[in-house]
Image: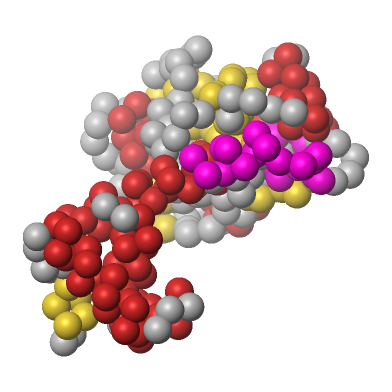
């Protein structure tokens, strides 16, 4: 398939309009129609109905493939451009909210750095496509186990560090005076669902036996301070690395004693690093 035709198709399907897609892509509407017709002829199947403009069953299936295919193409282009690039002009670091811990912040160069806080699943793609030079991802894992990251491109990961995890409870919560908690005992509790700011509930569910951990409130943001304030106010429990959970006003951080899991942070990068990116990786990975 011609990737130009595929990009046109994805844009038309996303906007549900040939004319809007033409404006977005900078083509004439006639050119967009020709692209779709050529792709349909190549695949031997109609991909869109015209009135209204919606994908057919075959078109829906193609959309499932299109995102990863186009991402791989973007990643390949970025990788080649990166190798042949002019001297560096700065460093862009993409990081999950709870991956950017005190040590990572202290290791950043004094100038020339852009930090982008992203959802965890978006960080490998940002590094692969060149919108970030390095990525910091985190998650729940057994000690020394690597994180499971989306397979978007040939990327390299390095462990930056591991630390204990804690359940954040309101100070008046009946369990706040415990010295440790088992996740299985909290499966029926009220939980905050904050997939981009805290540790996702599906990971807790997997670690706690595969059931329970139903959300009482969903937070769709990346500000950890908002998440901890919601937990302290009694809107639900949340699991956080110890360094983040400790010292939250109105809340108590109780360590998880079972199962044996840790908060793991990994650095995501391409194969060849130079300059500031290489030096930052040496600092983060070299002194755990």
Residue 277 vs 114, above or below: the answer is above
Question: Looking at this view, is 229 or 179 the one in front?
Answer: 229
Magenta span has 235?
A: no
Question: Looking at this view, is 211 or 220 the one in front?
Answer: 220
**In the drawing, does residue 202 fall left or right of residue 40?**
right
Residue at 44% from the left image edge and 35% from the top image edge: 153
**In the drawing, does residue 263 fall left or right of residue 191?**
right
The number of numbered discs placed on residues in the rendered structure image is 0
Residue at 25% from the left image edge and 58% from the top image edge: 63
- The image shows residue 168 at horizontal and vertical percentages of 55, 39
- In the rendered image, which quarter is residue 40 located in? bottom left
Residue 19 vs 102, above or below: the answer is below
- The image shows residue 128 at horizontal and vertical percentages of 53, 40
Res 236 seen here: no
Magenta span has 87?
A: yes
Residue at 41% from the left image edge and 28% from the top image edge: 148
Q: Which residues make up the magenta segment?
A: 76-105
Residue at 16% from the left image edge and 87% from the top image edge: 51
Question: Looking at this view, is 42 or 248 the one in front?
Answer: 42
- The image shows residue 144 at horizontal and vertical percentages of 50, 12
Res 79 seen here: yes
Residue 233 vs 16, above or below: the answer is above
């Amino acid at each position: 398939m011609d990737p130009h035709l595929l990009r046109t198709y994805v844009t038309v399907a996303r906007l549900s309009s040939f004319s809007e897609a033409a404006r977005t892509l900078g083509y004439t509407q006639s050119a967009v129609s020709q692209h779709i017709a050529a792709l349909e002829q190549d695949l031997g199947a109609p991909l869109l109905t015209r009135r209204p403009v919606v994908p057919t069953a075959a078109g829906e299936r193609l959309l499932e493939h299109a995102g990863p295919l186009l991402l791989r193409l973007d990643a390949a282009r970025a990788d080649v451009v990166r190798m042949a690039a002019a001297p560096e002009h700065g460093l862009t670091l993409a990081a999950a909210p709870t991956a950017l811990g005190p040590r990572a912040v202290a290791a950043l160069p004094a100038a020339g750095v852009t930090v982008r806080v992203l959802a965890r699943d978006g960080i490998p793609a940002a590094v692969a496509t060149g919108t970030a030079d390095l990525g910091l991802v985190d998650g729940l894992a057994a000690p020394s186990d690597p994180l499971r990251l989306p397979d978007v491109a040939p990327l390299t990961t390095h462990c930056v560090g591991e630390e204990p995890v804690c359940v954040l409870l309101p100070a008046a919560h009946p369990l706040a005076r415990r010295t440790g908690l088992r996740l299985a005992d909290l499966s029926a509790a009220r939980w905050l669902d904050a997939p981009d700011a805290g540790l996702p509930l599906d990971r807790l569910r997997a670690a706690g036996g595969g059931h329970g951990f139903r959300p009482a409130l969903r937070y769709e943001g990346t500000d950890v301070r908002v998440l901890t304030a919601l937990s302290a106010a009694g809107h639900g429990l949340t699991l956080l690395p110890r360094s983040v959970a400790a010292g939250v006003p109105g809340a108590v951080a109780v360590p998880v004693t079972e199962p044996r899991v840790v908060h793991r942070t990994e650095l995501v990068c391409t194969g060849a690093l130079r300059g500031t990116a290489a030096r930052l990786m040496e600092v983060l990975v070299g002194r755990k």
